[in-house]
Image: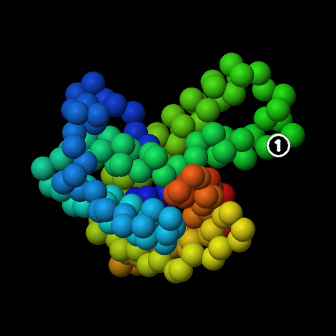
Amino acid sequence: MLVFGLAFQTVNAETKDPNAISLDKWNVTVKDPSNPDELMQAKWNSVVNVLNDKSLDVNTKADIIDKMIRPAFDFELMGKLAVGKTHWPKFSTAQREKFLALFVERLKTSYRDKIMMYENQTAEFAPGVPNKDTVQISMSIVSKDSKTAMLYKLRRADKSWKVYDVEIEGVS
């Protein structure tokens, strides 16, 4: 979660508009979007490229990372899973929209706090474990003093994959 857990960011008025920034400088190309292992590794490398860019302030870094990896996450499914299948159908359309907006905003705030702690950690990826239309990819964030286990759960969405859950040290 430290770097890539859930990267979402609000646009700060003092920060450049992330939509006006080309991502070409930092993005690592995913040669085969149907390969979830390659997708995760490329996204990690792209995030690290941004974090290592000394010319950017923290807010701009977070905005760029948000724009860069947002398409890889299925926020609606994440929200449904957070609420639970018993309660989600009881929500009106307006309640669902409000919940998802607040849910994503909470993730953004959490990420803003985590991104500021990045200090050249590395990532170790294990090959994905497929199960029908889903795959689980284990990743560890390694620093000098610790190793944090993460598990990304992805589902097939069109010709690519989207993260629908992230477990950190066994907690979803």
**Is 112 left, or right, of 28 in this rendering?**
right
Label 1 neighbourhood size at 10 Å, few (<14), some (14-19), many (20+)? few
Task: From the top left corner, tell me how far across and down residue 164 is, in percent.
Answer: 62, 53
Farthest left residue in view: 55
Q: Visible in this render: residue 167?
A: no
Q: Visible in this render: residue 94?
A: yes
User: How many badges with numbers are in the image?
Assistant: 1
At horizontal 38% and vertical 44% (from top left) the residue drawn is 66
Task: From the top left corner, tell me how far across and down residue 159 is, in percent.
Answer: 53, 56
**Is 7 above or below relative to 46?**
above
Q: Nearer the viewer, residue 129 or 115?
A: 129
Give the color scheme: rainbow, by chain, secondary structure or one colour. Answer: rainbow
**Is 82 above or below relative to 119?**
above
Task: Give the residue at mark 1.
Answer: 85
Q: Nearer the viewer, residue 72 or 8?
A: 72
Secondary structure of the residue carrying tag 1 is: loop
**Is 32 left, or right, of 152 in this rendering?**
left
At horizontal 43% and vertical 70% (from top left) the residue drawn is 38
- In the rendered image, the quadrant that contains the C terminus is bottom right
* Image quadrant assignment for residue 18: top left
Farthest top residue in view: 94
**Disc 1 residue type (three-letter):** Lys
At horizontal 79% and vertical 43% (from top left) the residue drawn is 84
Farthest right residue in view: 86
**Is 62 above or below relative to 156?**
above
* Image quadrant assignment for residue 153: bottom right
Task: From the top left corner, tell me how far across and down residue 82 is, in percent.
Answer: 71, 44
At horizontal 40% and vertical 39% (from top left) the residue drawn is 9
